[in-house]
Amino acid sequence: MKTFQLLNLGSEILKKNNISSHLIDSEIILSKILNISREKLLTNQSIVNLKNITKFKSKIARRSRSEPIAYIFQTKEFMGSDFFIDQKSLIPRPETELLIEPIMKIFKNKNLFFLEIGIGSGCIMISLLNDLKHSQGVGIDVCKKTLKNCRINLKKFKLENKCKLLLKSVDELNNIKFDLVVSNPPYIMRRDIKRLSKDIKRFEPTVALDGGNDGLDVIKKVIYKSTKVLKLNGILAIEIGYGQYRAVRNLLIANNFKEKFVIKDFGNNIRCIFSTLLKK
Ligand SMILES: C[S@@+](CC[C@H](N)C(=O)[O-])C[C@H]1O[C@@H](n2cnc3c(N)ncnc32)[C@H](O)[C@@H]1O
């Protein structure tokens, strides 16, 4: 079978199964199997061998059931690097990349000691450790299996010695002081989870999404805990959901934080807040 015939076949199967991104998904799946870029796939027609046709059909069948491509191939790119993931870890999102660059700028050439709350696959921690060569981190998460994935990624990037992982909830951490706390906590309102796309609600871990009744359960804990574990003038960098800015800003003020700056996503929504812990 030729590549274009397979692409059309994949796209048709996905379309029948209501996958709106059927064409592009078929292209991505085939290019990953053949290990070539999408551009090359579309410009160079070639014959696909039987083994790869079988692989392609099995992955198309998984995508037809709404499984995200990142889980099908167990990899997701974040900040230009590929991270191992499976269904125990949230798929790293582009908006989370917005947290990284300002931290790199603020702590360039400094000996940064930081905490990540809800480390998941480790994409934030590893991106920072990779860039900030003098930094060390502690990452906590309530999910044992995502910590296992994070360990795989730390090993892949040869950063095992720079990061300590703890199976702990944010409320259980004590007696350490950090220069920075960074977190992309679960922040979706519980009642909204059932309205998310099938890709997300069927496949991504609920514990990584569920922010309780108002979406702010874990955010509140992160802010409160940060008042205890941050050094004076330490920085809290937190990702928030759509429409949560006002509520989170008020929580920060009530907990003695001063806003440094915010970052908007491509839709002009405030998605990250950087603030400093003030003297009591
Ligand atoms: C939105 S995901 C973020 C994962 C990863 N940091 C990223 O940005 O892709 C939130 C993470 O917080 C973890 N989590 C949920 N509740 C927590 C809690 N109370 N304490 C610590 N981690 C928690 C989840 O298991 C999940 O891995």
Image (spheres, grey):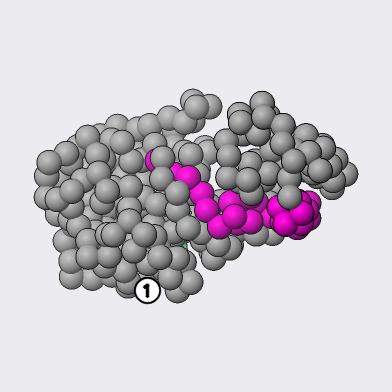
Q: Residue under circle 1? A: 167
Q: Magenta span covers which residues? A: 50-79
Q: Which of 255 and 185 lies nearest the eye of the viewer?
A: 185
In this picture, is 206 found above or below 257?
below
150, 38: nearer the viewer: 38
The structure residue drawn at horizontal position 23% and vertical position 70%, both measured from the top left corner, is 174
Whether residue 104 is situated above or below residue 205 in the rendered picture? above
- Percent x, y of residue 207: 53, 64
The x and y percentages for residue 221 are: 37, 60
Picture mark count: 1
Residue situated in front as seen by the camera: 135 or 73? 73
In the picture, measured across the screen, residue 208 lies left or right of residue 169, that is: right
Asked whether 280 or 238 is in front, the reply is 238
Dot 1: element? strand
Q: In which quarter of the image is ligand 1?
A: bottom left
Q: Can residue 182 be seen in this view?
A: yes
What residue is shown at x 73% (from left), y 50% (from top)? 49
Q: What residue type is labelled 1?
A: Leu
Asked if residue 65 is among those painted magenta in the image, a careful observer would answer: yes
Residue 124: image location, x then y, percent: 36, 50
x and y percent of residue 74 in the render?
56, 57
SS assignment for the magenta stretch, majority: helix
Task: Name which quarter of the figure residue 131 lies in.
Answer: top left
Q: Which residue is drawn at 22% across and 65% down?
A: 161
Q: Is residue 202 magenta?
A: no
Q: Can residue 56 be seen in this view?
A: no
The image quadrant where one finds the N terminus is top right
Q: Does the residue labelled 1 lie within 8 Å of ligand 1?
A: no
Residue positioned 55% across, 62% down in the render = 86
Q: In this view, does 50 lie above or below 26?
A: below
